[in-house]
Image: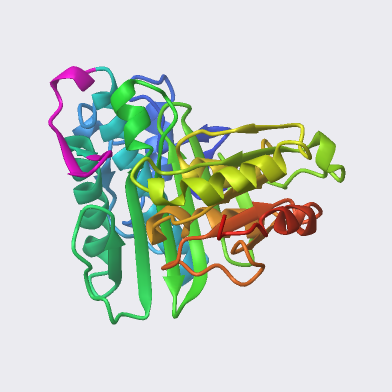
Amino acid sequence: PICQAPWHRNGYDLRRLPCDHPDWDSFAAHGRLVQSFLYTLTSANRTHGEGFCARLVPPIPLAKPLSGELVLLYVAVRAARRAGDIIARAFDRRDGLSIQQKQDRDFVTEVDQKSEASIIREIQQHYSSHGIVAEESERINPDASIQWYIDPLDGTTNFIHGYPHFAVSIGVWSKGKPLLAVVHDPIRNETFEAQNGNGAFLNRKRLRVSTKTDPAMALFATGLAPYRRDLLPVYMQRMHACMPVAEGYRQGGSAALDLAYVACGRLDAYWEQGLAPWDVAAGTILVQEAGGMTTDLQGASVDLEKGDVLATNGILHPTFQQLMQVNKEK
């Protein structure tokens, strides 16, 4: 079933409605019921954002006040979508982009930087005291109890090569515990979101992990960052362990999307070692809220700083966890 968010009206999503839609004016009037952190369509701003309006609406109290966590989720969704618009517009003009190499085979583009700046600006407009851990910037308010983990373009190498598999990833944690997550794929226009205790959704449709019980029918994903060749020997050992057992595997190049795909049942398992906090902070929440299971490769709780993750539909978790136990001395 489709959950009716405040920005939904008669089957339309007010956040994405084209300005020239015949029912635009009536829907814009409904949008004024949404508080200032939501953006809707108004005649004064029809040309903003290449056909989509992002003007803030004056705050008008709703009949039922929205919870603080729900407000956080709305802000995160809006920040991810705006960043996604920046990425999508730049995707067809990649040849003219500035690309820098942070370290061997680790790249950053001006799109990463613009996307990240947009997200940080959105967060600080509403939550200036919150902490921010972003891939391309210095940490902001590192001692704050609430931390936002941002990957403005997860899958930069894919983006550079024109391979349309990348996403914006935003995870919010409070005192070391997961709070909410948004992973937005700007090419497929898919927005995965989850809130602790309230389930996971894809474009407002509830998600559930797969129900596969037989590892021989399981499709798993994995990855190895090109700048982590030091992990190649143990990575190959785990691949040799998994391939005879599972049906097949995929290597998409975006940890955030791989985790989101486990959450929606497109994948049955995903594992990777040596990821950054912003790579896994959102995706692990999606999997858990969709009924799956996430641990590190040894079966302990996921440590964002360590970056080792195994995510499954839960049923297959013992099998894949056993496959992860290899001889690292080889």
Question: Residue placed farthest to the right in the image?
Answer: 214
Q: In front: 225, or 252?
A: 225
Residue toward you, 24 or 180 = 180
**Which residue in the rendered view is the most extreme toward the front?**
330
**Rendering coords of residue 172 (x, y %):** 43, 65
Q: If the image is split into quadrants, where does the C terminus sit? A: bottom right
Residue 329: percent from left, percent from top: 55, 60
Q: Indicate whether residue 150 is drawn in magenta.
A: no
Q: Quadrant of the N terminus?
A: top right
Q: Is residue 195 above or below residue 174?
A: above
The x and y percentages for residue 63 are 50, 64
Residue bounds of the magenta highlight: 93-107
Q: Is residue 275 above or below residue 147?
A: above
Determine the residue positioned at 61% across, 47% down. 237
Residue at the (45%, 40%) spot, across then down:
254
Task: Tell me residue 194's x, y (percent).
Answer: 56, 56
Q: Nearer the viewer, residue 12 or 248?
A: 248
Q: Is residue 34 visible?
A: no
Determine if residue 9 is in view: yes
Q: Residue at x 45, y 58 (%)?
A: 73
Q: Is residue 141 left or right of residue 316?
A: left
